[in-house]
Amino acid sequence: MNKITKLWMGTPAILLAGWAGTANAAAVPDSEHVAKLLSEAKTMAFQIKEDAVAMEGFTRMDVSWESHAVAINQIRDHVNALEKQEALLKDARNAASPWQKTAIDRIVPYLDELEGYTSAVIERINDKPSRFLTADYKDFLEANADYATDLAAMIGEFVDYGKTRDRMERLGTKLEIPKR
């Protein structure tokens, strides 16, 4: 047997193994509860993103440290609310489908970093309110805005994926397309 024949003979087994893996993944239905929690997390993350991006913009304007303090406290409150949402997601993780579990697992590190940068900004304002616009303070604001933007985009993409996947399954049922 030549190399091409050997390669071809192995290909169906690989394809069948891949198909079986897809069928097993599809066998675990999406959790409506987790989908709802993710959708709520998306809304929260987008609010944090808007606040963090606006606050990062303060560095290019003449804004008082008191305005910075109000803004970062609002961000902190929103981050705390998203952390509570994360806890609800973790509690519901066992009922989640594989892609929902992946979404939950990926939120954790972003939220941890976001919380760290938010705390760093608060510390800088509290330490020296009259001299808060240092280079590292601006870096923390930029990092906060970047992590908030990335987190909101990621959660949004997972929510969109879930909605698209659900829509495709409904269309498949409507068109009477056999499931694998």
Image (spheres, grey):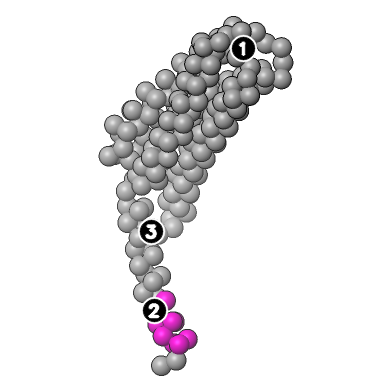
User: Which of label 1 and label 3 is nearer to you?
Assistant: 1
Q: Depth check: 179 or 101 in front?
A: 101
Residue shown at 50% from the left, 25% from the top: 117
Classify mark 1: residues with Cα within 10 Å, few (<14), some (14-19) or many (20+): few
Give residue 124's position: percent from left, percent from top.
53, 16
Q: Is residue 34 above or below residue 164?
A: above
Q: Mark 1 highlights which residue? A: 131
Give residue 72's position: percent from left, percent from top.
53, 15
Q: Mark 3 highlights which residue? A: 22
Q: In which quadrant of the rendered image does the N terminus lie?
A: bottom left
Quote the CA–CA distance across marks 1 and 3: 57 Å
Residue 11 visible somewhere in the drawing: yes
Give residue 35's position: percent from left, percent from top.
40, 35
Residue 43 visible somewhere in the drawing: no
Tag 3: amino acid: Thr
Q: Are marks 1 and 3 in contact (CB under 8 Å)?
A: no
Q: Which residues are magenta?
A: 3-11
Q: Quadrant of residue 41?
A: top left
Sequence-earlier tag: 3 or 2: 2
**Residue 139 numbered tag:** none
Q: Is residue 6 magenta?
A: yes
Q: Is residue 172 magenta?
A: no
**Residue 10 numbered tag:** 2
Q: Quadrant of residue 47?
A: top right
Quote the CA–CA distance across marks 3 and 2: 19 Å
* Predominant SS of the magenta segment: helix
Residue shown at 36% from the left, 34% from the top: 34
Tag 2: amino acid: Gly
